[in-house]
């Protein structure tokens, strides 16, 4: 799965039964939510305290492997006018940098 891409393309890229892992990226923590295998409901999974990127990526990769995750959904924080500010740029960079650490 080539990251990142629009959410509309996600269903065509997933294997049947693959779960989704949702991210709410903060500067100090990463909130995670995990979907069921039908991808209808997501429930809170855990909050990961951010440290170094490589440690964070290793933790996320372990969770993804353990839970049968086939795709990620990462919230993109936009400004009120719809433009992308520094947090959105940091989120895109996180997604790009995380992709090589995952086997999705």
Image (cartoon, rainbow, N blue to C red):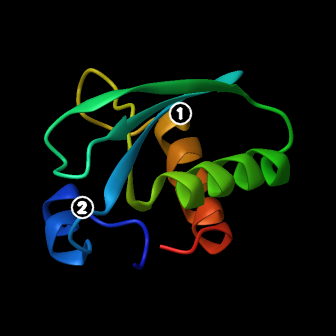
The crowding category of the residue bearing disc 2, from other C-alpha atoms within 10 Å (few below 14, some 14 to 19, many at least 20), is few
Quarter-of-image position of residue 76:
top left
Q: Examine the rendered structure and indicate whether residue 67 appears above or below residue 14.
A: above
Residue 6 is labelled as: 2
Q: Examine the rendered structure and indicate whether residue 103 appears above or below residue 81.
A: below
**Towards the viewer: 77 or 58:** 58
The quarter in which the N terminus is drawn is bottom left
**Can you see residue 18?**
yes
Measure how far apart labels 1 and 2 are at the Cα level: 18 Å
Q: Position of residue 59 (x, y in %)?
A: 72, 47
**Towards the viewer: 53 or 19:** 19
Q: Position of residue 70 (x, y in %)?
A: 38, 65
| Residue at (45% x, 60% y) in the render | 68
| Residue at (64% x, 74% y) in the render | 100
| Residue at (62% x, 60% y) in the render | 98
Q: Is residue 46 left or right of residue 15?
A: right
Q: Is residue 53 left or right of residue 91?
A: right
Quarter-of-image position of residue 16:
bottom left
Residue 27 is labelled as: none
Q: Position of residue 44 (x, y in %)?
A: 41, 23
Q: Are marks 1 and 2 in contact (CB under 8 Å)?
A: no
**Can you see residue 76?**
no
| Residue at (54% x, 55% y) in the render | 64
Residue 87 is labelled as: 1
């Amino acid at each position: 799965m080539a990251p990142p891409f629009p959410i509309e393309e996600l269903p065509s890229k997933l294997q049947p039964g693959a779960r989704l892992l949702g991210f709410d990226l903060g500067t100090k923590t990463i909130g995670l939510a995990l979907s069921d295998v039908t991808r209808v409901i997501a429930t809170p999974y855990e909050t990961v305290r951010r440290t170094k990127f490589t440690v964070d990526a290793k933790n996320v990769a372990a969770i993804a492997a353990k839970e049968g995750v086939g795709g990620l959904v990462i919230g993109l924080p936009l400004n009120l006018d719809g433009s992308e500010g520094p947090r959105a740029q940091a989120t895109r960079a996180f997604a790009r940098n995380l992709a090589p650490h995952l086997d999705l």
